[in-house]
Amino acid sequence: MGHELIGLNPQKTIMKKKISVYWPLAVILPLAATAYVHALSDAASRAPQAPLAAGQLTAELARTVSYGLVGDAARGPGKTMREAATLPAHATL
């Protein structure tokens, strides 16, 4: 019914050999390209940054103080981000 029951076609044998030889390249080359792009992006993110402007610096400082990351040591840390994100028990949606 259209199937070849007698032996393998020589073209199919050649194709199977090519596939068995080149399939590792089909897997390794995209992985290598991805690793290369990832390494380049990491190098770009570690590039020295320009100093912050005064307005931007004070905004970042105010943000860290409001998050409780800096401040009085006696007071202890503020709420964690998870605690700050949860709604109070009496709040309804």
Image: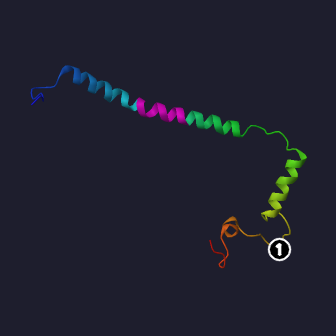
In this rendering, position of residue 5 left or right of residue 17: left
The image quarter in which residue 77 lies: bottom right
Locate the C terminus by quadrant. Answer: bottom right
x, y percent for residue 91 = 66, 75
x, y percent for residue 73 = 84, 70
Residue at the spot x=55%, y=36% of the render? 35
In this rendering, position of residue 7 left or right of residue 39: left
The image quarter in which residue 80 lies: bottom right
In this rendering, position of residue 80 left or right of residue 6: right
* 24 in relation to 60, above or below: above
Pointer 1: residues within 10 angstroms few (<14), some, or many (20+)?
few
Residue at the spot x=49%, y=36% of the render? 31
* 10 in relation to 81, above or below: above
* 55 in relation to 85, above or below: above
- Residue at the farthest bottom position: 90
x, y percent for residue 1 = 9, 31
Range of the magenta residues? 25-34
The image quarter in which residue 39 lies: top right
Residue on which disc 1 sits: 75
In this rendering, position of residue 12 left or right of residue 83: left
Three-letter residue code for mark 1: Arg
Secondary structure found at label 1: loop
Q: Quick one: 3 or 40, which is closer to the camera?
A: 3
Q: Quick one: 87 or 24, which is closer to the camera?
A: 87
x, y percent for residue 4 = 12, 27
Q: Main secondary structure of the magenta part?
A: helix
- The colour scheme is rainbow
Is residue 32 in the magenta section?
A: yes
